[in-house]
Structures are given as C-alpha cells and as structure tokens.
Image: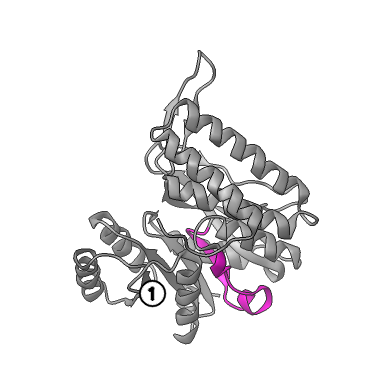
Amino acid sequence: MNELQVGAVVVTYHPDEDVAENLRLLREQVETMVVVDNGSSPVELEMLHRTRDALRFELIENGDNLGIATALNQGVRRVRELGRSYAMLFDQDSRVTEGFVTTMVQCFAASRSTKSLAILVPRYVDKRLGGILPPPVNRGGGLEMATTSGSLMPIEIFDIAGWFADELFIDIVDYEYSLRVRQVGFTIDECADAVLLHSPGTPTTHRWLGSKEFQAPNYSPVRRYYQERNKIWLTKRYWQSFPRYCLRTFVFSAKDLLKIVLVEEDKFRKCQYFWSGVRDGLRGRTGKIRV
C-alpha cells in the first residue's frame, strides 16, 4: 500500500476561507482529492471553484444538502472510479498536520490486524482548546468507534459491509458504520503518530456550583434533533450485539440535556428539538426534516 492508492474525500457545507487552507494542506499530500459540496451558496461555491482551479481537485456539487452519509458515499464511489483502493474521509473543518497521509498509510500497512482492519483513525487534537480527544476503546481490543474525519478505509469494505446509511442524513453516521463493520468481524484502530486538528461542535468550558470543570458542546437545535433520533434508530438495530454501547448513548443524552438546561443558550428550542428527535426515533422516522 502507498499514497498513490489513496483518494481523499472532503464534504463541504457552507465553507469559509479557512476551508480553502484546509483543502490546500490536504491536497499537497494526496494525488487524488474529491470534494463533495452539500448545497452551499453561490458565493461559497465561487470560493470552492477558485480553490479547485488552483489546487486541481474534483468538485461534485449537489445543489442541496443531501446529508453527510450520501455525500460520503458519492465521494468514495468517485474515488474508486478514479482507480484508488483506499479512501480517506474528511470534514471541511479538519486540518492535516505535516506528513499526515504518509503516516496513516504506513500505520495501516504495519497494522498487525491489517486483514481485518476496516477503519484506521488518527490522533485527534482539539484545534480550539489544544487537548487530545481520546478515542473510545473496545474492551475486546481495538477501538469501539471511529470518527469520520481523517479515517482511512479500504474501499472494498463497502462491498462487504455496505455503504453509509443515507437515511440517517447527519449525525451518528460514523458510529453506526463502526458498529456495522465490527458486527461482521472487522476491527477499528488508531494511528497515534498521525495528528489531525479537529474540533467537534463549538465547546465551551463551565464550572457548576464549584464542581469539576465540564464542557458543553453547544450543538444547534437541529443537530440535537438528528442526534437523538438517530441514536434510537441505531439502538433498535444494534441493541442485541452492542448493549453496553447503546445504553451509554442514552446516559450521554441525559448528561447533554442537563448541560443544555444549565449552561447552553437557546435552551427552549434545543430541548424542543431534542424531544422531537426522541419522538420521531420511536416512530421510526428517518431522512431529512424541514426546518
């Protein structure tokens, strides 16, 4: 395996100028890069067009927000059409460090579980707060979950485990796929030497009644909806195979709801969307909602 076999897939959604710099740094490390845009404005697309012309990558314009799962599937299919055997997936806000792709490729090749390795993730460092974001470890060895951004995957895994779940639209997409590949016998691992600068949400740090500091992620009301709805969708499918994980997701939900009430802004709308997500998850609703 070498860098020439890897194609990068980046999903954009209302990108700013910082995204152009992220794309430039990544483009310097890969031969093939496909950017899939989910319904950005004409001004934002103009910036992407300029960046594409300067960096020479392929741009797929969806014209509407089709969701992260569909966009990732589009990008991976196009990377395979371009002759690559591995896909490296990115959010627009993530920024690679020097030698990132080479290190990931070397880690994948050296992995003792290469034959069963479905997803390799990097070491995530919060680019706003500077701390390491530790991955969830599976008691049986390897990682429990993979975050999409920076992950390296053999494209053949999609022929075995299927594609990302379009019906989830956004949120929980990567966690669902992690459970799916593990369910069919594959593993997830971390390359600690490859560092990706990444920031989930817009976290703020708080202290409540003199207690230990904690972070509130400050996701939007709409994100809260998809998170809660899709957690229930996931639990219905994986409860028997991964009961501990499914139970923990609802513990995290309870903690997040408490943080919303205590310290986050726009409390009423976030709580409203939170419970709407729970309701629709129980009803089996999927896909994009009207906002």
In the rendered image of this protein, does residue 245 appear above or below residue 155?
Answer: above
Residue at 44% over, 59% down: 100
Viewer-nearest residue: 60 or 152: 60
Classify mark 1: helix, strand or loop. Answer: strand
Q: Is residue 193 visible?
A: no
Residue at 55% over, 30% down: 258
**Measured from the top left, where is residue 101 in percent x and y?**
45, 64
**Measured from the top left, where is residue 112 in percent x and y?**
70, 62
The quadrant of the image that shows the N terminus is bottom right
In the rendered image of this protein, does residue 51 appear above or below residue 149?
Answer: below
Q: Quadrant of residue 269?
A: top left
Would you call the spot at circle 1 few (<14 residues within 10 Å), some (14-19), or many (20 or more)?
Answer: many
Residue at 26% over, 61% down: 20
Viewer-nearest residue: 230 or 138: 230
**Measured from the top left, where is residue 171 in percent x and y?**
52, 55
Q: Amino acid at mark 1?
A: Val
Range shown magenta: 148-167
Q: Which residue is mark 1?
A: 34
Q: Is residue 62 visible?
A: yes
In the rendered image of this protein, does residue 129 appear above or below residue 45?
Answer: above
Please state the total of marks drawn on the protein image. Answer: 1
The quadrant of the image that shows the C terminus is bottom left
